[in-house]
Protein backbone atom coordinates (compact mmCIF):
# COMPACT_ATOMS: atom_id res chain seq x y z
CA UNK A 1 0.00 0.00 0.00
CA UNK A 2 1.22 3.47 -0.90
CA UNK A 3 0.79 6.10 1.84
CA UNK A 4 1.27 9.75 0.93
CA UNK A 5 1.62 12.43 3.57
CA UNK A 6 2.62 16.09 3.79
CA UNK A 7 5.03 17.06 6.58
CA UNK A 8 5.00 20.77 7.47
CA UNK A 9 8.31 21.97 8.88
CA UNK A 10 8.99 25.63 9.77
CA UNK A 11 12.06 27.48 8.59
CA UNK A 12 14.56 27.82 11.44
CA UNK A 13 14.22 30.91 13.63
CA UNK A 14 17.98 31.59 13.30
CA UNK A 15 17.76 31.99 9.52
CA UNK A 16 19.42 35.23 8.45
CA UNK A 17 17.34 38.15 7.22
CA UNK A 18 19.09 38.11 3.84
CA UNK A 19 17.97 34.53 3.21
CA UNK A 20 14.41 35.33 4.28
CA UNK A 21 14.39 38.31 1.91
CA UNK A 22 15.61 36.12 -0.94
CA UNK A 23 12.88 33.59 -0.12
CA UNK A 24 10.35 36.41 -0.21
CA UNK A 25 11.54 37.60 -3.63
CA UNK A 26 11.54 34.04 -4.98
CA UNK A 27 7.98 33.28 -3.83
CA UNK A 28 6.78 36.66 -5.15
CA UNK A 29 8.33 35.95 -8.57
CA UNK A 30 6.74 32.50 -8.65
CA UNK A 31 3.35 34.04 -7.88
CA UNK A 32 3.86 36.58 -10.68
CA UNK A 33 4.73 33.80 -13.13
CA UNK A 34 1.69 31.74 -12.09
CA UNK A 35 -0.62 34.74 -12.53
CA UNK A 36 0.81 35.46 -16.02
CA UNK A 37 0.33 31.85 -17.12
CA UNK A 38 -3.15 31.80 -15.61
CA UNK A 39 -4.07 34.83 -17.72
CA UNK A 40 -3.32 32.83 -20.87
CA UNK A 41 -5.81 30.09 -19.99
CA UNK A 42 -9.54 30.19 -20.67
CA UNK A 43 -12.30 27.56 -20.25
CA UNK A 44 -11.84 26.68 -23.95
CA UNK A 45 -8.08 26.03 -23.61
CA UNK A 46 -6.91 22.43 -23.81
CA UNK A 47 -5.52 21.60 -20.36
CA UNK A 48 -2.29 19.76 -21.09
CA UNK A 49 1.39 20.61 -20.68
CA UNK A 50 2.05 20.76 -24.42
CA UNK A 51 -0.56 23.48 -24.99
CA UNK A 52 0.48 25.57 -21.99
CA UNK A 53 4.18 25.31 -22.84
CA UNK A 54 3.44 26.60 -26.33
CA UNK A 55 1.43 29.52 -24.88
CA UNK A 56 4.22 30.30 -22.42
CA UNK A 57 6.84 30.25 -25.18
CA UNK A 58 4.78 32.42 -27.54
CA UNK A 59 4.22 35.05 -24.82
CA UNK A 60 7.86 35.10 -23.56
CA UNK A 61 6.86 34.33 -19.97
CA UNK A 62 10.35 33.09 -19.06
CA UNK A 63 11.93 36.36 -20.24
CA UNK A 64 9.33 38.50 -18.45
CA UNK A 65 9.77 36.72 -15.12
CA UNK A 66 13.47 35.89 -15.28
CA UNK A 67 12.83 32.36 -14.02
CA UNK A 68 14.56 29.20 -15.16
CA UNK A 69 12.80 26.62 -17.29
CA UNK A 70 12.41 24.35 -14.26
CA UNK A 71 10.54 27.00 -12.28
CA UNK A 72 8.36 27.88 -15.29
CA UNK A 73 7.40 24.22 -15.78
CA UNK A 74 6.46 23.95 -12.10
CA UNK A 75 4.31 27.07 -12.40
CA UNK A 76 2.60 25.49 -15.41
CA UNK A 77 1.81 22.41 -13.32
CA UNK A 78 0.32 24.65 -10.62
CA UNK A 79 -1.97 26.38 -13.12
CA UNK A 80 -2.98 23.04 -14.65
CA UNK A 81 -3.92 21.68 -11.22
CA UNK A 82 -6.01 24.78 -10.45
CA UNK A 83 -7.92 24.66 -13.74
CA UNK A 84 -8.55 20.92 -13.56
CA UNK A 85 -9.94 21.38 -10.05
CA UNK A 86 -12.14 24.17 -11.41
CA UNK A 87 -13.41 21.89 -14.19
CA UNK A 88 -14.32 19.18 -11.68
CA UNK A 89 -16.21 21.62 -9.45
CA UNK A 90 -17.89 23.30 -12.41
CA UNK A 91 -18.97 19.95 -13.85
CA UNK A 92 -20.58 18.98 -10.56
CA UNK A 93 -22.26 22.40 -10.36
CA UNK A 94 -23.51 22.10 -13.95
CA UNK A 95 -25.07 18.71 -13.20
CA UNK A 96 -26.93 20.08 -10.16
CA UNK A 97 -27.99 23.23 -12.05
CA UNK A 98 -29.36 21.28 -15.04
CA UNK A 99 -31.31 18.98 -12.75
CA UNK A 100 -32.76 21.96 -10.88
CA UNK A 101 -33.81 23.58 -14.18
CA UNK A 102 -35.44 20.35 -15.31
CA UNK A 103 -37.35 20.04 -12.05
CA UNK A 104 -38.44 23.68 -12.35
CA UNK A 105 -39.81 23.13 -15.87
CA UNK A 106 -41.81 20.09 -14.75
CA UNK A 107 -42.97 21.57 -11.44
CA UNK A 108 -46.49 22.62 -10.62
CA UNK A 109 -47.62 25.84 -9.02
CA UNK A 110 -47.16 24.57 -5.46
CA UNK A 111 -43.43 23.89 -5.59
CA UNK A 112 -42.41 26.42 -8.24
CA UNK A 113 -41.45 29.20 -5.81
CA UNK A 114 -39.15 26.92 -3.83
CA UNK A 115 -37.47 25.61 -6.99
CA UNK A 116 -37.00 29.14 -8.35
CA UNK A 117 -35.12 30.06 -5.17
CA UNK A 118 -33.01 26.93 -5.56
CA UNK A 119 -32.11 27.78 -9.17
CA UNK A 120 -31.28 31.36 -8.22
CA UNK A 121 -29.07 30.16 -5.38
CA UNK A 122 -27.24 27.79 -7.71
CA UNK A 123 -26.69 30.62 -10.21
CA UNK A 124 -25.10 32.72 -7.48
CA UNK A 125 -22.88 29.81 -6.39
CA UNK A 126 -21.40 29.04 -9.80
CA UNK A 127 -17.67 28.25 -9.35
CA UNK A 128 -15.40 31.02 -10.59
CA UNK A 129 -12.28 30.55 -12.69
CA UNK A 130 -8.94 30.41 -10.83
CA UNK A 131 -7.51 33.78 -9.77
CA UNK A 132 -4.16 34.29 -8.01
CA UNK A 133 -4.28 37.59 -6.13
CA UNK A 134 -2.10 36.59 -3.18
CA UNK A 135 1.13 34.66 -2.78
CA UNK A 136 0.80 31.10 -3.98
CA UNK A 137 3.41 28.39 -4.20
CA UNK A 138 4.17 25.67 -6.71
CA UNK A 139 5.63 22.25 -6.02
CA UNK A 140 9.42 22.23 -6.27
CA UNK A 141 11.13 19.00 -7.33
CA UNK A 142 14.71 17.94 -8.06
CA UNK A 143 15.03 20.49 -10.89
CA UNK A 144 14.90 23.50 -8.57
CA UNK A 145 15.40 22.22 -5.04
CA UNK A 146 15.69 19.33 -2.61
CA UNK A 147 15.57 18.54 1.10
CA UNK A 148 18.94 17.55 2.60
CA UNK A 149 19.99 16.21 5.96
CA UNK A 150 22.66 17.95 8.02
CA UNK A 151 25.11 16.77 10.67
CA UNK A 152 25.60 19.90 12.76
CA UNK A 153 23.10 21.87 14.84
CA UNK A 154 20.77 22.11 11.82
CA UNK A 155 19.44 18.62 11.08
CA UNK A 156 17.50 19.50 7.95
CA UNK A 157 18.15 21.93 5.09
CA UNK A 158 16.14 23.23 2.16
CA UNK A 159 18.35 23.57 -0.91
CA UNK A 160 16.71 25.80 -3.57
CA UNK A 161 17.76 27.65 -6.70
CA UNK A 162 17.68 31.44 -6.51
CA UNK A 163 16.70 34.07 -9.05
CA UNK A 164 20.35 34.46 -10.04
CA UNK A 165 21.48 31.99 -12.68
CA UNK A 166 23.75 29.26 -11.30
CA UNK A 167 23.29 30.33 -7.65
CA UNK A 168 21.66 28.20 -4.97
CA UNK A 169 20.68 28.83 -1.38
CA UNK A 170 20.56 26.57 1.68
CA UNK A 171 17.85 27.45 4.21
CA UNK A 172 17.90 25.66 7.60
CA UNK A 173 14.68 24.04 8.80
CA UNK A 174 13.55 23.50 12.38
CA UNK A 175 12.19 19.92 12.54
CA UNK A 176 10.90 18.27 15.68
CA UNK A 177 11.40 14.62 16.61
CA UNK A 178 8.00 13.86 15.07
CA UNK A 179 9.03 15.43 11.75
CA UNK A 180 12.26 13.42 11.63
CA UNK A 181 10.38 10.18 12.35
CA UNK A 182 7.93 10.92 9.53
CA UNK A 183 10.79 11.49 7.07
CA UNK A 184 12.66 8.37 8.17
CA UNK A 185 12.34 5.68 5.51
CA UNK A 186 10.07 7.84 3.34
CA UNK A 187 10.69 9.00 -0.22
CA UNK A 188 10.49 12.77 -0.73
CA UNK A 189 8.82 13.57 -4.04
CA UNK A 190 8.59 17.38 -3.86
CA UNK A 191 7.97 20.29 -1.48
CA UNK A 192 6.38 23.74 -1.33
CA UNK A 193 7.49 27.00 0.29
CA UNK A 194 4.50 28.45 2.16
CA UNK A 195 4.31 31.77 4.01
CA UNK A 196 1.78 31.85 6.85
CA UNK A 197 1.42 34.39 9.66
CA UNK A 198 4.75 35.99 8.79
CA UNK A 199 6.69 32.70 8.87
CA UNK A 200 7.95 30.39 6.14
CA UNK A 201 7.24 26.65 6.11
CA UNK A 202 8.38 23.78 3.94
CA UNK A 203 5.47 21.48 3.06
CA UNK A 204 7.27 18.25 2.18
CA UNK A 205 5.35 15.54 0.27
CA UNK A 206 6.44 12.07 1.34
CA UNK A 207 5.62 8.61 0.00
CA UNK A 208 5.94 5.47 2.09
CA UNK A 209 5.32 1.82 1.21
CA UNK A 210 3.33 -0.12 3.82
CA UNK A 211 2.50 -3.82 3.64
CA UNK A 212 -1.23 -4.36 3.19
CA UNK A 213 -2.55 -6.42 6.08
CA UNK A 214 -5.02 -9.28 5.86
CA UNK A 215 -8.23 -8.38 7.67
CA UNK A 216 -10.51 -10.68 9.63
CA UNK A 217 -13.90 -9.03 9.22
CA UNK A 218 -15.75 -5.83 8.33
CA UNK A 219 -17.00 -2.76 10.14
CA UNK A 220 -18.78 0.53 9.68
CA UNK A 221 -18.46 4.06 11.07
CA UNK A 222 -21.26 6.61 11.25
CA UNK A 223 -20.56 10.26 12.07
CA UNK A 224 -23.05 12.22 14.12
CA UNK A 225 -23.73 15.35 16.14
CA UNK A 226 -24.42 13.99 19.61
CA UNK A 227 -22.08 11.01 19.32
CA UNK A 228 -19.00 11.90 17.31
CA UNK A 229 -18.48 8.37 15.97
CA UNK A 230 -20.60 5.23 16.13
CA UNK A 231 -18.51 2.13 15.30
CA UNK A 232 -19.76 -1.41 14.65
CA UNK A 233 -17.48 -4.41 14.00
CA UNK A 234 -19.10 -7.50 12.45
CA UNK A 235 -17.58 -10.30 14.54
CA UNK A 236 -19.42 -13.49 15.50
CA UNK A 237 -20.72 -11.38 18.35
CA UNK A 238 -20.86 -7.84 16.89
CA UNK A 239 -18.97 -5.17 18.80
CA UNK A 240 -20.42 -1.69 19.24
CA UNK A 241 -18.69 1.49 20.40
CA UNK A 242 -19.70 5.13 20.72
CA UNK A 243 -16.77 7.55 20.66
CA UNK A 244 -17.28 11.00 22.15
CA UNK A 245 -15.09 14.03 21.69
CA UNK A 246 -14.28 16.98 23.96
CA UNK A 247 -13.92 19.27 20.97
CA UNK A 248 -17.43 20.66 21.26
CA UNK A 249 -16.88 22.16 24.73
CA UNK A 250 -13.52 23.60 23.68
CA UNK A 251 -14.95 25.18 20.54
CA UNK A 252 -17.91 26.61 22.48
CA UNK A 253 -15.44 28.21 24.89
CA UNK A 254 -13.44 29.85 22.09
CA UNK A 255 -16.63 30.90 20.27
CA UNK A 256 -17.83 32.75 23.39
CA UNK A 257 -14.49 34.57 23.76
CA UNK A 258 -14.42 35.48 20.06
CA UNK A 259 -18.02 36.74 20.20
CA UNK A 260 -17.26 38.97 23.20
CA UNK A 261 -14.17 40.39 21.46
CA UNK A 262 -16.13 41.09 18.28
CA UNK A 263 -18.81 42.88 20.31
CA UNK A 264 -16.20 44.98 22.12
CA UNK A 265 -14.51 45.86 18.82
CA UNK A 266 -17.81 46.94 17.30
CA UNK A 267 -18.45 49.33 20.20
CA UNK A 268 -14.86 50.65 20.25
CA UNK A 269 -14.76 51.39 16.53
CA UNK A 270 -16.84 54.58 16.78
CA UNK A 271 -15.43 56.12 19.97
CA UNK A 272 -12.75 58.70 20.59
CA UNK A 273 -9.28 58.22 19.01
CA UNK A 274 -7.61 57.32 22.32
CA UNK A 275 -9.52 54.02 22.25
CA UNK A 276 -8.07 53.05 18.85
CA UNK A 277 -5.03 51.49 20.53
CA UNK A 278 -7.32 49.17 22.46
CA UNK A 279 -9.18 48.39 19.25
CA UNK A 280 -5.98 47.28 17.49
CA UNK A 281 -5.00 45.17 20.50
CA UNK A 282 -8.35 43.42 20.42
CA UNK A 283 -8.03 42.88 16.66
CA UNK A 284 -4.62 41.26 17.10
CA UNK A 285 -5.94 39.06 19.90
CA UNK A 286 -8.92 38.05 17.77
CA UNK A 287 -6.64 36.82 14.97
CA UNK A 288 -4.65 34.78 17.49
CA UNK A 289 -7.80 33.21 18.90
CA UNK A 290 -9.08 32.29 15.46
CA UNK A 291 -5.83 30.50 14.70
CA UNK A 292 -5.82 28.79 18.08
CA UNK A 293 -9.43 27.66 17.64
CA UNK A 294 -8.54 26.05 14.31
CA UNK A 295 -5.49 24.35 15.85
CA UNK A 296 -7.63 22.94 18.68
CA UNK A 297 -10.16 21.60 16.18
CA UNK A 298 -7.50 19.89 14.06
CA UNK A 299 -5.75 18.47 17.14
CA UNK A 300 -8.94 16.85 18.46
CA UNK A 301 -9.69 15.42 15.01
CA UNK A 302 -6.28 13.73 15.02
CA UNK A 303 -6.96 12.31 18.50
CA UNK A 304 -10.28 10.96 17.31
CA UNK A 305 -8.64 9.42 14.23
CA UNK A 306 -6.07 7.66 16.42
CA UNK A 307 -8.83 6.22 18.63
CA UNK A 308 -10.82 5.01 15.64
CA UNK A 309 -7.76 3.46 13.95
CA UNK A 310 -6.79 1.64 17.15
CA UNK A 311 -10.30 0.32 17.78
CA UNK A 312 -10.79 -0.88 14.17
CA UNK A 313 -7.33 -2.44 13.83
CA UNK A 314 -7.56 -5.61 11.74
CA UNK A 315 -10.88 -4.82 10.01
CA UNK A 316 -12.02 -3.57 6.63
CA UNK A 317 -13.91 -0.38 7.47
CA UNK A 318 -16.39 1.77 5.58
CA UNK A 319 -17.32 5.34 6.56
CA UNK A 320 -20.56 6.99 5.57
CA UNK A 321 -19.83 9.61 2.93
CA UNK A 322 -22.43 12.33 3.31
CA UNK A 323 -22.84 15.85 1.94
CA UNK A 324 -25.52 16.73 4.48
CA UNK A 325 -23.61 19.79 5.64
CA UNK A 326 -23.46 21.23 2.12
CA UNK A 327 -27.24 20.88 1.73
CA UNK A 328 -27.97 23.12 4.72
CA UNK A 329 -28.30 26.52 3.08
CA UNK A 330 -29.24 29.81 4.69
CA UNK A 331 -32.97 30.34 4.74
CA UNK A 332 -34.03 26.70 5.04
CA UNK A 333 -35.76 27.40 8.36
CA UNK A 334 -33.28 25.44 10.51
CA UNK A 335 -30.74 27.99 11.81
CA UNK A 336 -29.98 26.05 15.01
CA UNK A 337 -29.11 22.91 13.03
CA UNK A 338 -26.85 24.90 10.68
CA UNK A 339 -25.08 26.37 13.69
CA UNK A 340 -24.51 22.92 15.18
CA UNK A 341 -23.18 21.25 12.06
CA UNK A 342 -21.07 24.29 11.20
CA UNK A 343 -18.73 23.42 14.07
CA UNK A 344 -18.01 19.91 12.82
CA UNK A 345 -15.45 18.90 10.21
CA UNK A 346 -16.88 15.64 8.87
CA UNK A 347 -14.75 15.55 5.73
CA UNK A 348 -11.52 16.20 7.64
CA UNK A 349 -12.36 13.49 10.17
CA UNK A 350 -12.90 10.96 7.38
CA UNK A 351 -9.56 11.87 5.78
CA UNK A 352 -7.70 11.63 9.10
CA UNK A 353 -9.23 8.25 9.97
CA UNK A 354 -8.42 6.84 6.52
CA UNK A 355 -4.85 8.15 6.80
CA UNK A 356 -4.20 6.69 10.26
CA UNK A 357 -5.57 3.34 9.14
CA UNK A 358 -3.44 3.44 5.98
CA UNK A 359 -0.34 3.86 8.15
CA UNK A 360 -1.28 0.50 9.71
CA UNK A 361 -1.72 -1.13 6.29
CA UNK A 362 -5.54 -1.08 6.42
CA UNK A 363 -7.92 0.10 3.72
CA UNK A 364 -10.93 2.38 4.28
CA UNK A 365 -13.96 2.73 2.02
CA UNK A 366 -16.38 5.61 1.59
CA UNK A 367 -19.94 4.40 0.97
CA UNK A 368 -23.20 6.22 0.41
CA UNK A 369 -25.00 6.41 3.75
CA UNK A 370 -28.40 7.22 2.26
CA UNK A 371 -31.27 5.65 4.26
CA UNK A 372 -28.91 4.06 6.79
CA UNK A 373 -30.47 5.96 9.70
CA UNK A 374 -34.10 5.20 8.85
CA UNK A 375 -33.67 1.54 7.84
CA UNK A 376 -33.33 -1.23 10.41
CA UNK A 377 -30.26 -3.44 10.19
CA UNK A 378 -32.62 -6.31 9.26
CA UNK A 379 -33.54 -4.36 6.11
CA UNK A 380 -37.02 -3.27 7.15
CA UNK A 381 -38.27 0.29 6.68
CA UNK A 382 -41.14 -0.20 9.18
CA UNK A 383 -39.40 1.73 11.93
CA UNK A 384 -40.21 4.46 14.42
CA UNK A 385 -37.54 6.95 15.49
CA UNK A 386 -37.69 8.32 19.02
CA UNK A 387 -35.70 11.16 20.58
CA UNK A 388 -34.68 11.40 24.23
CA UNK A 389 -32.04 13.54 26.02
CA UNK A 390 -30.34 14.66 22.83
CA UNK A 391 -30.09 11.11 21.45
CA UNK A 392 -32.28 9.08 19.12
CA UNK A 393 -33.04 5.39 18.81
CA UNK A 394 -34.83 3.20 16.28
CA UNK A 395 -37.67 0.79 17.05
CA UNK A 396 -38.24 -1.79 14.31
CA UNK A 397 -41.80 -3.14 13.94
CA UNK A 398 -40.58 -6.13 11.90
CA UNK A 399 -37.90 -7.68 14.11
CA UNK A 400 -38.74 -5.83 17.33
CA UNK A 401 -35.19 -4.55 17.90
CA UNK A 402 -34.51 -1.27 19.64
CA UNK A 403 -31.12 0.29 18.92
CA UNK A 404 -29.34 3.62 18.98
CA UNK A 405 -29.83 5.36 15.62
CA UNK A 406 -26.09 5.99 15.16
CA UNK A 407 -25.20 2.34 15.83
CA UNK A 408 -28.01 1.22 13.53
CA UNK A 409 -26.56 3.39 10.73
CA UNK A 410 -23.09 1.96 11.43
CA UNK A 411 -24.52 -1.58 11.09
CA UNK A 412 -25.98 -0.74 7.68
CA UNK A 413 -22.72 0.88 6.55
CA UNK A 414 -20.76 -2.20 7.67
CA UNK A 415 -23.14 -4.49 5.75
CA UNK A 416 -22.69 -2.40 2.62
CA UNK A 417 -18.92 -2.61 3.07
CA UNK A 418 -19.13 -6.40 3.36
CA UNK A 419 -21.34 -6.73 0.28
CA UNK A 420 -19.09 -4.47 -1.83
CA UNK A 421 -15.95 -6.37 -0.81
CA UNK A 422 -17.54 -9.75 -1.55
CA UNK A 423 -18.64 -8.53 -4.99
CA UNK A 424 -15.07 -7.43 -5.77
CA UNK A 425 -13.65 -10.79 -4.70
CA UNK A 426 -16.26 -12.74 -6.68
CA UNK A 427 -15.56 -10.70 -9.81
CA UNK A 428 -11.81 -11.21 -9.38
CA UNK A 429 -12.33 -14.97 -9.00
CA UNK A 430 -14.47 -15.07 -12.16
CA UNK A 431 -11.82 -13.16 -14.11
CA UNK A 432 -9.10 -15.58 -12.98
CA UNK A 433 -11.28 -18.56 -13.91
CA UNK A 434 -12.05 -17.17 -17.36
CA UNK A 435 -8.38 -16.40 -18.00
Image (tube, rainbow, N blue to C red):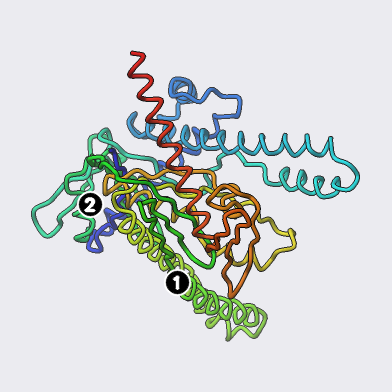
| Looking at the image, residue 123 lies above or below residue 393 | above
Of circles 2 and 1, the one toward us is 2
Q: Residue at x 51, y 49 (%)?
A: 412
Residue, disc 2: 182
Left-right relation of 66 to 14: right
Q: Residue at x 75, y 39 (%)?
A: 100
What number is the disc on residue 230?
A: none
Which residue is nearer to you in this view: 117 or 412? 412
- How many discs mark residues in the rendered view? 2
Q: Are marks 2 and 1 in contact (CB under 8 Å)?
A: no
Where residue 45 appears, as percent x and y from the top left, is: 56, 24
Which residue is nearer to you in this view: 360 or 55? 360
| Looking at the image, residue 417 lies above or below residue 68 | below
Residue found at the very far front of the displayed protein = 399
State which quarter of the image contains the N terminus. top left
Left-right relation of 324 to 77: right
Element under label 2?
helix
Number of residues whose C-alpha sits closer than 10 Å to that of mark 1, classed few (under 14), some (14–19) or many (20 or more): few
Residue found at the very far top of the displayed protein = 435
Which corner quadrant of the image does residue 229 belong to? Answer: bottom left
In this rendering, does residue 16 appear at all?
A: yes
Residue, disc 1: 288
Left-right relation of 25 to 82: left
Where residue 291 appears, as percent x and y from the top left, is: 45, 67
First of labels 2, 1 by sequence position: 2
Residue found at the very far right of the displayed protein = 109
State which quarter of the image contains the C terminus. top left
Element under label 1?
helix
Number of residues whose C-alpha sits closer than 10 Å to that of mark 2, classed few (under 14), some (14–19) or many (20 or more): some
Where residue 126 appears, as percent x and y from the top left, is: 67, 42
Which residue is nearer to you in this view: 95 or 411? 411
Amino acid sequence: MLVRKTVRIPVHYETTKSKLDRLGRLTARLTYCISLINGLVSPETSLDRKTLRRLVKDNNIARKTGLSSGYVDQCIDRVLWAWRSYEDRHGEWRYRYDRALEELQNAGDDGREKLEKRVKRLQENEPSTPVFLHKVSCRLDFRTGRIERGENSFLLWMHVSTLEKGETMDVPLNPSYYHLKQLEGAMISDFEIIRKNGKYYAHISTTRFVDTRITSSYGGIDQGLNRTLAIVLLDEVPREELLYDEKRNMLDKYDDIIASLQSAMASARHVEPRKLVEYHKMSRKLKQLRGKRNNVSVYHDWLLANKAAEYTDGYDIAIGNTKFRQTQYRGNGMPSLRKRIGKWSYGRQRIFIAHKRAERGLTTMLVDERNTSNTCRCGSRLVARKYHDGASWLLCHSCGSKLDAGLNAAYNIALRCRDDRLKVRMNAAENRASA
